[in-house]
Image (cartoon, grey):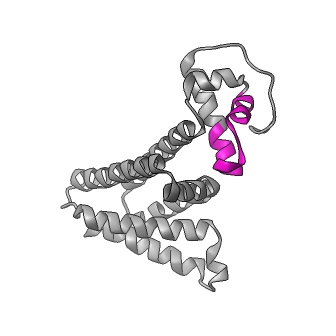
Amino acid sequence: MTATSARKPRKARDAQESRRMLVEAAAQIFNSDGFHGTDTNRIAKAAGYTPGTFYTHFTDKRAIFLEVYQCWVDAELIDIAAGVKFKGPDQSERLAKTILNHHKKWKTFRASLRALYAIDPEIRTARLAQRARQIDAITTISVEAGREPLSRSRIFCNLLLLEVICDSIADGNLQTLRIRESEMFQILVENIGRLRAD
């Protein structure tokens, strides 16, 4: 049964489990149908709860979207930290694959995030806070690896380039532009190498 199909409402269970189930259902729906393609009732039903249970945990659809975004960044940082622990000449390539696959897996969610960032001040604030968190995490990883960390502005520029490349590949834009994915992937690898080696 998919997350979008209606389930029989569940009896109340512990609050953490209910919240987790709501977030999981929202993540699946946001990633299949986008932010504007659903509502709070549908999210609650997909998780197996009544709409009232949704509002016990979240004030509105934006609030759960922000929670899903927090989980998305958490998962990406965990994947990156695991990739950094791998030592070898192809570490940058492995990290590039990890980051790209994360963007491909969540392409519809990320499209909603980009659109909302442009028009919603609360989403913009949250995204900038997550960006600062990513910069801090990269700085910490550099220090723990015994390297001099890059400046925040250089890390930010590299993150922007990584994000644009990953989103362009995930969204399927390259074929229309007559650009080979393998060439963009190589640029992605080189950019990650700069983050690691500069």
Q: Quadrant of residue 44?
A: top right
In the rendered image, residue 6, in percent from the top left (x then y), is placed at 81, 31
Compared with residue 102, is residue 122 higher up or lower down, i.e. above or below? Answer: above
- Nearer to me, 130 or 93: 130
Tell me what residue is drawn at x 64 percent, y 56 percent.
108
Residue 12 image-quadrant placement: top right
Residue at the image point whose x is 53% and y is 62% from the top = 100
Location of residue 44 with respect to 101 vertically, above or below: above
- Asked if the stretch drawn in magenta spans residue 104, the answer is no
Q: Is residue 32 left or right of residue 86?
A: right
Q: Nearer the viewer, residue 145 or 8?
A: 8
| Left or right: 175 as drawn, with respect to 90 | right
Q: Is residue 32 visible?
A: no
| The N terminus: image quadrant | top right
Residue 60 picture location, percent across and down: 58, 34
The location of residue 29, given as percent across then percent down, is: 69, 44
User: Is 184 located above or below residue 68 in the figure?
Assistant: below
Rendered position, 74 above or below 13: below
Instruction: Give residue 76's position: percent from left, percent from top.
Output: 47, 50
**Residue depicted at 48% across the width and 77% down the height:** 186
Q: Which residues are magenta?
A: 26-47
